[in-house]
Amino acid sequence: MQQPNPEILKELVTHQMPFGKYKGRKLCDLPVYYIEWFAAKGFPDGKLGMQLATLFEIKTNGLGEILEGLKKL
């Protein structure tokens, strides 16, 4: 089993959405319905796709408090 990378979680609370309706919004602050839309249509290639897929797993499994704690650091 692969060990989780804590940098990925840090990036979710610091990196911004680079395009679209929510351009400039921090990834962790994207609405769930928007991330679900990506999950249905396909996440983008590369790092952003991995970040959005990770965010999808966190938010749809009720683990959003992890991100809330990181936002305070």
Image (cartoon, rainbow, N blue to C red):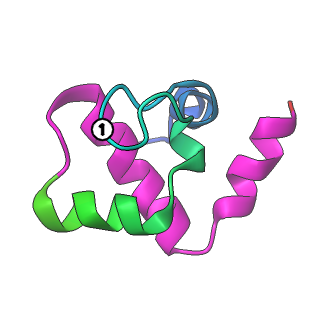
Left or right: where does residue 67 sit relative to residue 24? right
The reply to whether residue 1 is visible in this rendering is: no
Q: Nearer the viewer, residue 35 or 57?
A: 35
The residue type indicated by label 1 comes to Gly
Main SS class of the magenta portion in the image: helix
- Residue at horizontal 12%, vertical 61%? 41
Residue that mark 1 sits on: 20
- Residue at horizontal 76%, vertical 39%? 70
Residue 50 found in image quarter: top left
- Residue at horizontal 36%, vertical 25%? 18
The magenta stretch is 43-72
Q: Nearer the viewer, residue 24 or 64?
A: 24
- Residue at horizontal 26%, vertical 65%? 37
Left or right: where does residue 40 sit relative to residue 51? left
Residue 51 found in image quarter: top left
Left or right: where does residue 22 sit relative to residue 15? left
SS at badge 1: loop
